[in-house]
Image (tube, rainbow, N blue to C red):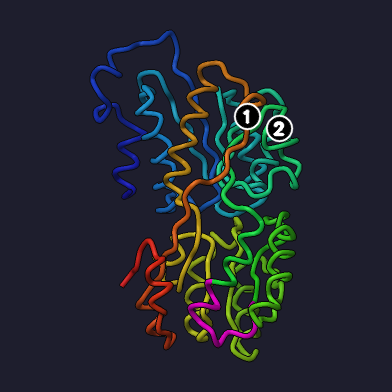
Amino acid sequence: MRRREFITLIGGTAAWPISARAQQPARLRQVAILRAEVAGDPEGLRNSSALIQGLQALGWAQGSNLRIELRWAGGSVDAVKALAKELVALAPDVIVVVSTPISAAVMQETHTIPIIFVQNFDPVGSGIVKSLVAPEGNITGFTSYEPAMGSKWLELLKGVAPQVASVAIMYNPQTAPYAGAFLRPIEAAALSFAIQPTAMPIQDAGTIEKAIEAFARETNPGLLVLPDLTTTVYENVMVKLAVQHGMPGIYPWRHYVTAGGLMSYAVDLPVLWRRAASYVDQVLKGAKPANLPVQQPTKFELVINLTTAKALGLTIPASILSLADDLID
């Protein structure tokens, strides 16, 4: 969704059904959204709009019975903490957050305001919830991956680029505290795919550039990017350098591929955000997060950039092309 369309969606009432606008509740209910990306990020707008559209379908109309407060952290851990304080001070009816670090930051600020997370990884292992079935506390939501996904990423990368013999696994330990949950299955599966995995921590554009340039000297190198606040912010840097150095890469989200990355295998994010609207709706109607089990993804999609494959000298096998949900050319 384009920026102008999103602003219209959250800022005006003209697009909302007349029947919804006609209902005038005693007060506006307030939903806060805290995102990790830079303000106005196209993917962030697309996913946030999916949430709002889901709420619209359930009868919640911006300016009539609902107010949206959207904040962007710009990939900064310090900004996440400051914005968490800011949003909690507004005392919204529910806070919707992206990622494990943002979930943790908001949880530190409130034990009473309901929190719905989306795109969280290993919420039990990260201490965000007690269990998937019984979250307890004031938080619940939707996960994006199982840690075992790591072996699937290796399988797909090897299937598309069979020459790959070593893979750099890129993430920021500060913003991906759950990285170990992905690394263990990746390292366990690497032997069967004849791949040497190397964990490669990064922090910013400079460390990403140095890491990729150094790893490009390895024999038949490849790249596997973990889902992470930092890697999302610097997706264009990673994609550009990987192609420049001839490194086939597999990425955690579709938007890396639309930016020029080779391939991704990931949950369909707009679908996930639209599903999250059902939990926001239930909380606004009185449900407690502790009574709403954490939900896991139901739909994954394989996306391949054929232009990038050609630039890397790769021919995608028919067996993998037949599995692709989308081919970008």
Relative placement, left or right, of 203 versus 47 is right
- Tell me how far mark 2 sits from mark 1, CA to CA: 7 Å
Residue under the image location 65 percent in, 71 percent down: 169
Q: Which amino acid does label 1 sit on?
A: Val
What SS does tag 2 mark? helix
Q: Is residue 271 magenta?
A: no
Q: Counting other residues with Cα less than 10 Å from the Cα at mark 2, is it few (<14), some (14-19), or many (20 or more)?
A: some
Circles 2 and 1: CB distance less than 8 Å? yes
Q: What stretch is highlighted in magenta?
A: 156-167
Residue 100 location, x and y as percent? Answer: 66, 46
| Numbered circle sitting on residue 88 | 1
The answer to which of 221 and 302 lies nearer the viewer is 302
Sequence-first tag of 2 and 1:
1
At a point 65% along the width and 59% down the height, the residue shown is 148
Q: Name the residue located 59 percent from the left edge and 72 percent from the top edge.
A: 154
Quadrant location of the C terminus in the rendered image: bottom left
Q: Which amino acid does label 2 sit on?
A: Glu
The answer to if 165 sits in the magenta stretch is yes
Q: In which quarter of the image is residue 205?
A: bottom right
Numbered mark located on residue 109 in the image: 2
Taking depth in this image into account, of 121 and 192 the one nearest to the observer is 192
